[in-house]
Image: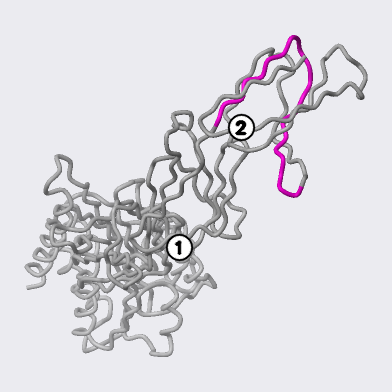
Amino acid sequence: MIKSIIKYLFLLLLIGNSCFGQNNEKKLQIPKTRILFIFDASQSMYGFWDKSRKIKIARDVLKRMVDSLDNLENVQLGLRVYGHQSEVPPQDCNDTRLEVPFAPNNGSKIKHKLNYIRAKGTTPIAHSLEQAQHDFPECKQCRNIIILITDGREACEGDPCAVSNELQKKGIILKPFVIGIGLDPNFKHTFECVGDFYNTPSKDKFKHALDVVITKILNTTTAQVNLLDDYGKPSETNVGMTFYDHLSEKVLYNFVHTLNYKGNPDTLTLDPLVTYDLVVHTLPEVRKDSITLNPGKHNMIGLDAPQGMLNLKCPNSNQYRNLKFLIKEKGSHQLLNVQKINEIEKYIVGKYDIEVLTVPRISLKDVEIRQSHTTKIKIPQPGILNILREGSGYGSLFQKKDNNKLKWILNFSPNHEKQSLILQPGEYEITYRPKNIKNTMFTRRKSFIVKSGSSTTITLD
């Protein structure tokens, strides 16, 4: 029965993953699931429990489970045992060993090894977890999972919680599973920080817990990301989104959000054993941290991401075809985006400050982006300033402001005899001194007006 259920679950897992690539030539690669059983063979496992010895019950149940998993494609098993090499006393806190490494179809080796394991030593849980990181050969497309089966807590002054947390932060393993055999209920807090903990008071409960754990590991779990507009509807789409492992900060998935043919957010197949941080690459980004999934269910992940469009134009002007402008959130000094003129870009609903890289620059404050609306901005058509000089010299360009003040715009190159500038319409002044004149009082000033679509020539002599 167990075997048929697991095969069915794994078939669903394969189907769910393959759905990503039904219309593509390349299908997503299905990750390999590697399950390492860490088996307690300490002296206490020789004690009686539910009318038999603990180690016999644990051995028999685990052998049946291994037999069910052995022939599943993309699943590999390994076995690490502790407390089986040295008797107590004395206490050997290094008594842990990888007995069966990961390999395809190695279930018979694991069952054979379990037959000869004898309970006689101590309980070095932390050290066993620490050593387990070396049991997983390097693999970029693998899910590394530990199932710890134990009847006692740490006996060697190690910290299993700290070791487990560190291995998860490094991205070596997913959150482990711990199945306790007849443990004192007061030990619950001791193992909950190590991983998902199941305390089993009887043989039947132990079998059920192991079934539940394997089902969680192999079950198909789906989710949809609802990018909500200002009306609370999941209408926003066509934007990148990245799923990170919350602990290790490792990138696990990187998708482009899609609405399916029915207009609903597309269904994703995700690993239910991970706590995620989700970043949606809108402008600015929106994120949701510490997302946990309900295994075997369809999960809804909602984020507020209302967007509108921004378009900047300059009518009747070819001079600005490569013009760019800078976008910042209102009141922020951090650059959000560099957008090109005549192109349309989406932004999260709100107010923004814009700086257009004309000469002189145009500053626009509190530009409002509204839901599903295109905010259109038009800037004046520029004029052209031609500067002629008989020789080299030094000079600057200023813009005349309404308050009768001058705003510096740029300095001229001292060695160019001719220059052309594309300028916004307005009143300007040039200061200029020939290079061969060493008297500041001979600085020359010229005022002029630049009109849209017109050309103005200034001669500096």
Q: In the rendered image, which residue does mark 1 sit on?
A: 247
* Label 1 Cα crowd, 10 Å radius (few <14 / some 14-19 / many 20+): many
Rounded to the nearest angstrom, the CA distance separating label 1 from label 2 is: 59 Å
Q: Nearer the viewer, residue 457 or 324?
A: 457
**Closer to the observer: label 1 or label 2?**
2
What residue is shown at x 74% (from left), y 9% (from top)?
390
Magenta segment, principal secondary structure?
A: strand
Q: In the rendered image, which residue does mark 2 sit on?
A: 450
- Dot placed on the residue nearer the N-terminal end, 1 or 2: 1
Height in image: 61 above or below 432? Answer: below
Q: Nearer the viewer, residue 113 or 287?
A: 287
Q: Quadrant of residue 371?
A: bottom left
Per the rendered image, the range of residues in magenta is 383-403
The secondary structure type at the circle numbered 1 is loop
Estimate the x, y position of residue 345 in percent, counting from the top left: 39, 48
Does any portion of residue 39 appear in the rendered image?
no
What's the residue type where badge 2 is placed? Val
Estimate the x, y position of residue 261 in percent, counting from the top left: 13, 57
Q: Nearer the viewer, residue 144 or 155?
A: 144
